[in-house]
C-alpha cells in the first residue's frame, strides 16, 4: 500500500486564490440586483407618492432593511480585494494592509448585521 501524497503548498495556495476570485466575482454580480433593489426601496421610502404603486412604504422599509447586510457583505467581498490590488499596483501594500482590510470588512458586515437585528 502506498501512502497518499498531500498536495503541494503552491497548488493549495493557487486553488485558494482561484476560489477567492470566484467569490469576488460572484459578489460583484450579486451587487447589481442588490443595489437596484436598494435604490428602489430607498426611493420608495423617500418618495411614496411617486413609487407607491411599485412598493408600499412598509414593504420598502422591510426590503431595504433585509437587503442591507447582504449588500454590505457583497460590497466588502468584491470591493476590498479590488482596493488591495489597486494599492498593490501602486506599491502601497504593507503587511498590516491585509489585516486592516479584513478587520474593517468584518466590522462593516458585523455592524450592518447588528443594525438589521435591531430592526
Image (cartoon, helix red, strand yellow):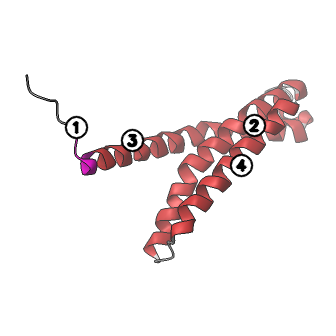
Which numbered marker is on residue 113?
A: 2
Which residue: 82% across, 41% down? 43
Instruction: Judge depth for marks 3 and 1 and give the one in front.
Output: 1
Q: Nearer the viewer, residue 40 or 21?
A: 21
Instruction: Judge depth for marks 1 and 2 and give the one in front.
Output: 1
**Quadrant in which the C terminus is drawn:** top right
Q: Secondary structure at mark 4?
A: helix
Nearest to N terminus: mark 2 or mark 4:
4
Which residue was labeled with disc 3? Answer: 19
Which residue was labeled with disc 4? Answer: 108
Nearest to N terminus: mark 2 or mark 3:
3
**Quadrant in which the N terminus is drawn:** top left
Q: Relative to 45, is 96 above or below?
A: below
Residue 35 location, x and y as percent? 66, 42
What is the residue that sits farthest to the top in this orientation? Answer: 1
Q: Secondary structure at mark 1?
A: loop
Which residue: 75% across, 30% down? 66
Q: What span is in magenta?
A: 7-11
Which residue: 37% across, 44% down? 16
Q: CA distance from mark 2 to mark 3?
A: 25 Å
Nearest to N terminus: mark 3 or mark 1:
1
Which residue: 51% across, 63% down? 84
Which residue was labeled with disc 1? Answer: 6
Q: CA distance from mark 3 to mark 4?
A: 22 Å
Nearest to N terminus: mark 1 or mark 2:
1
Residue 101 location, x and y as percent? 60, 58
What is the residue that sits farthest to the left in this orientation? Answer: 1
Amino acid at each position: 500500500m502506498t501512502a497518499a501524497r498531500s498536495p503541494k503548498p503552491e497548488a493549495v495556495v493557487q486553488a485558494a486564490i482561484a476560489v477567492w476570485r470566484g467569490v469576488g466575482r460572484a459578489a460583484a454580480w450579486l451587487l447589481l440586483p442588490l443595489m437596484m433593489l436598494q435604490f428602489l426601496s430607498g426611493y420608495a421610502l423617500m418618495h411614496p407618492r411617486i413609487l407607491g404603486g411599485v412598493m408600499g412604504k412598509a414593504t420598502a422599509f422591510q426590503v431595504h432593511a433585509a437587503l442591507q447586510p447582504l449588500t454590505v457583505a457583497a460590497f466588502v467581498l468584491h470591493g476590498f480585494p479590488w482596493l488591495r490590488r489597486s494599492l498593490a499596483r501602486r506599491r502601497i501594500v504593507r503587511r498590516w494592509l491585509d489585516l486592516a482590510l479584513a478587520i474593517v470588512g468584518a466590522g462593516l458586515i458585523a455592524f450592518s448585521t447588528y443594525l438589521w437585528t435591531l430592526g
